[in-house]
Amino acid sequence: MSVVTIMSGSFCGAEEVAQDVASRLQVEMLRDEDVMGLVDRNGGPEAGVLRRAIYGRTSIFNQFSHEKERAVSALKLATAKLLAEKDGLVLLGHLSLLVPRTISHVLEVCLIAETKYRAARAGRELGLGEKEALARVHRDDESAIRWAEYLLDLDPWDAKHYDILLPMDKREPGEAAGFIVEQAQGGPLAVTDISRQAAQDFLLAAQVEQVLSGHGHSGKDIQVAAKGGTIDIQVNKKVLRLNKLSKDLEDLAGQVAGVKEVKVEPGPGFYHADVYRQADFQLPSKVLLVDDEREFAQTLSERLLLREIGSAVAYDGEQALKMVAEDEPEVLVLDLKMPGIDGIEVLKRIKSDYPKVEVIILTGHGSQRDMEMCMDLGAFAYLEKPVDIDKLSQTMQAAYDKVRGQEG
């Protein structure tokens, strides 16, 4: 039984088509949310992190946390397990783009339609006005474009990635489902020993990538492929000691059951100027510094980076709250005296809306009363400028350890 993957533009009737295809083929249908649930329940990144990785913008902290790469690695492994374990399946959604073209019994389908048609459907289905409906479609498209570019460097509607591309403004859902089923049941898509091996290779590569990702190696910096037990790893960022990195990658990959040989070599990106950075997940990687003294904040950020602590900077309370809403940090280092929304108000809102975020007050204009108020409001610590960088780093580490303990 073949597998059908369906990537779709929003408001193209994809749910109806996918359910019809699954019913006619008598196989299970899984959506992105279903796969995210599997990952979450099996101890992987929580659903919110997975959802941001698929549909959201890349976090400003990602270069330090590798959160997106780790989430994608977990999603890829779950998808690979499904393909290896199930004889037939309909996979609907963005995760369909994780499936490699090398598995010949997978029929890869894209459903798309003209923007005007989709906006009209969005208006009818959601009760939106013309402008709001069009904005919704554009927003959905931006999400799909980011995801496809991240994975494949392709437009999500590029016909090169699919076996079938169906214009849904020109077909009824039942007609589209019938055509897909007819193609899926054709001889070329039969499961063979070769196609099963390709699925197993995909699974083994995903297992290796998961191990490497868990040890701080970014899935964007290294690319993993498998064939018959041989693992090929390409390093796509400049590294000063390639031999040492190669040995580390070989040792980690060699621990995965089924790996017979590991080959590491420079990839196309190795010769670019960027430097390879392995993440250390024991250190804080999502710290937001909030201080209206720009030079101080920038210098502090640079000094923390030397200690492998990843940080971003906001220069006032309003900007800080916006950044927290878009990219929730783990630790926030907050000045009290700022123009506009002051530190006390920022602390109140953060602890109310994002209670898991640990807040360290760092101020040069505080008082005993301020300290008592901040601690009562839930601040993790209260420090005064000038602060010793080692003391600040240790306090950040303690706050981060508390965050990790809460997540565990």
Image (cartoon, helix red, strand yellow):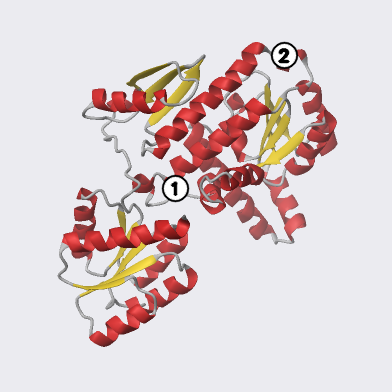
Residue placed at 73% from the left, 27% from the top?
88
Give the residue type that dot 1 points to.
Answer: Thr
Compare residues 364 and 143 and report the one nearer the observer. Answer: 364
* Residue lying furthest bottom: 369
Question: Counting other residues with Cα less than 10 Å from the Cα at mark 1, is it few (<14), some (14-19), or many (20 or more)?
Answer: many
Percent x, y for residue 131? Answer: 64, 59
Number of numbered markers: 2
SS label for mark 1: loop
Left/right of residue 90 with respect to residue 37 in the rendered view: right
Q: Tell me if 43 is positioned left or right of 23 in this view.
A: left
Q: Earlier in the sequence, mark 2 or mark 1?
A: 1
Pointer 2 local density, CA inside 10 Å: few below 14, some 14–19, many at least 20: few
Q: Which residue is label 2 attached to? A: 188
User: The disc labelled 2 sits on which kind of residue?
Assistant: Pro
Residue that numbered label 1 is attached to: 58
Image x and y of residue 389, in percent = 17, 61
Q: Position of residue 203 (x, y in %)?
A: 55, 26
Residue 332 versus residue 280 in the image, above or below: below
Residue under the image location 41 percent in, 77 percent down: 348
Q: Is residue 56 left or right of residue 174?
A: left
